[in-house]
Structures are given as structure tokens and as C-alpha cells.
Amino acid sequence: MYVYKTLFAAAVALATIASTLVEASPIPANAAVSNYVPVTKRMYTAEQVDQHEKILKRSSVGFNDWSCKPSSAHPRAIILVHGLIANNWDNWLYMAPRLVARGYCVYSLTYGQLPGIPLLAGLDKMENGAVQLSAFVDKVLAATNTTKVNLLGHSEGSLMPRYYLKYLGGSSKIDKFAAFGAIAYGTTLSGLVPFLTSLGLYDTIKGIIDPVCLSCFQFLPNSQFLQDLNAGGDTVPGVQYKFIVSKTDEVVTPYTSGLLKDKNPLVQNVVLQSLCPVDLSEHVAQMVDPIVFNAVDAYFNPARPQTINCLSAMT
């Protein structure tokens, strides 16, 4: 079922990209072949050219533009932090270009790669990923000549940055931290871990997985990583948090383990279905969910509409 949902989400993402590219073409989609006019002979008004350029900008990924300077409307650059087995590109095919089109300076890193394993990242210990994030944040701050940035994470990207905030001095450099498909207190992987333990297979499976995924067992509820991370509180002073979880998330189980527990006035915990009861996006589908996107955009930009509901899927 999870593989099916993953493929479905990928198909949605590809369809979204394809529809954007079709829209970017100056040739009407329903134009008859007999009416085709070669590019060299077409004539466009200034308004058509301007509209075409805007669409092209929206349909390109557009992030990691190191010449981008934050505006007064968007004073904080956004750093995107991908999830497990993703990278800085494929995790953000939907959200990155839309954030750029709305005026943000957007940056994304690939972290936690292991030797000999291409494309798949987030596999190294999260402590090491946090060191990479720290260096990347400093690079973005220098490029944008600012003192703070915002973070947007998915899945592991909601968890690893908290190590950076707590142990590597990140709290002084981050203003807002938003995350979806959030993980705060680990996951049972839909009961898989207790099942393997009951069969006496836990240590065997761990021995097989550990060499190729050092971070995997850090996600478990009683891991030493999570115990250290949550000891004394799961947030740090001065940073604002917005963690979004979904009741239909089959990777983060129970879904409530993605909620922060500190009684911190700067924390917003959001259940996706409280925004739109019929939104059934699970872990992967949240990456291409317009309601999630608009909730994040509204969080980073108070000038955007702050009421997020099912109608937000249309914007």
C-alpha cells in the first residue's frame, strides 16, 4: 500500500509539473495543426511576452539562486530540508518553484549522503546532517547579508534540524521553523518495529539496515538520539515552530508523535484534517498538497491570507 501511495504521489507531482510546462507554451493547447505558426513568424504583444516570462519563472525550479536578495516583503530566506532517502531537488519539485514565484529567496541542501549511494540522502547519522545544515545556513546568511533565515522541513527534515537548533547554536540564526510530515517523538512504522521485536528479528534486521542507513534506527521512539534531543524540552527559546501532521500518515505512527509537547507560546501544532477534513494526504502526498503549501506560505508571510481550509486547494 505504501509503495502504491508513493507512486501515486509521484504521478501527481509529475502531472503538476507537466501541466505547468504545457501552460508555459505560447501555443494554445487546442490549436489545430493546420493553424501552426513557426516560432520565427509569431508575433506577441508586450503583455503576452510578460505573462509568458512569469509562467516560465513559475515552472522552473528557481531555488539556490545565490544572487537573490531578500525583499522587505520577504526578509527571511527559506532553507528547505528534505526527508529520508530524498535529496535537495526531488523533495521540493512542487513547493520550491511556488515559493520562488511568491517572492522568497529559496535554498535547499542535500545532507546525509553515504559513500557509494547516489541520489538517496539523509542516510547518515542525523548529528552529521546537522553539521552540514549548520554550514549551509551560514553560507545562506553570508550570501543574503542577513542574520536569520527560516527553515522548512519534511519528515527527517523536521527532526534533524532540531539537533542543529539545540546543540549547534542554530537557535540564534533561525526565526521560523515550519515542517510537515513531522516527526518529534519517533515512529513505530505502522507497528512494524513491535512486530519484528515480537518475532525476535529486530537485531537481525537492524544489522542488515545499519550499514546503509545510519539514521534509520534514530527514528525509533526509544532511540538514544530522540532521548537526548527531547530531554529538557523539545523546543529552544526564541525560535517559532509550526509542525503539521496528518491523521493518514502511515510513516509517522502514531501521527500524534509528530506534535511538539512543550508549553511554548511560539509553537503551533496543526493537524492537517483540522484545516480540511477531506484532505487525506499521507506522508509523501503532503509534498504536493496545496493546502500544506498555503499553510506554510501563510506562516512565513503574515500578509498572505491566514485562513487555510479546503478552498486553499484552489490557490
Image: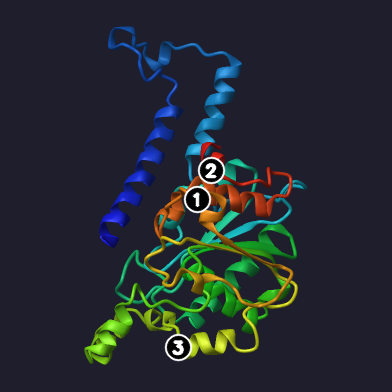
Amino acid identity at mark 1: Pro
* Mark with earlier residue (2, 3): 3
Please identify, in this view, whether the residue under mark 3 or under mark 1 is nearer the observer: 1
Which residue is farthest right?
A: 72
Label drawn at residue 109 = none
- The Cα atoms of the two marked residues, 3 and 1, are separated by 32 Å
Which residue is the site of mark 2? 310
- Residue 224 in the image: state x and y as whole percent: 48, 91
For mark 2, does the 10 Å Cα neighbourhood hold few (<14), some (14 to 19), or many (20 or more) residues? Answer: some
In what element is the residue under mark 2?
A: helix
For mark 3, does the 10 Å Cα neighbourhood hold few (<14), some (14 to 19), or many (20 or more) residues? Answer: few
Amino acid identity at mark 2: Cys
Q: Residue at x 39, y 73 (%)?
A: 113
Q: Is residue 159 left or right of residue 261?
A: left
Q: Are marks 2 and 3 in contact (CB under 8 Å)?
A: no
Which residue is the site of mark 3? 222
Label drawn at residue 277 = 1
* Residue 287 quadrant: bottom left
* Mark with earlier residue (1, 2): 1
- Residue 72 in the image: state x and y as whole percent: 77, 47
Q: Residue at x 50, y 79 (%)?
A: 185
* Mark with earlier residue (3, 1): 3
Q: Are marks 3 and 1 in contact (CB under 8 Å)?
A: no
Does 66 sit above or below residue 56? Answer: below
Q: Are marks 1 and 2 in contact (CB under 8 Å)?
A: yes
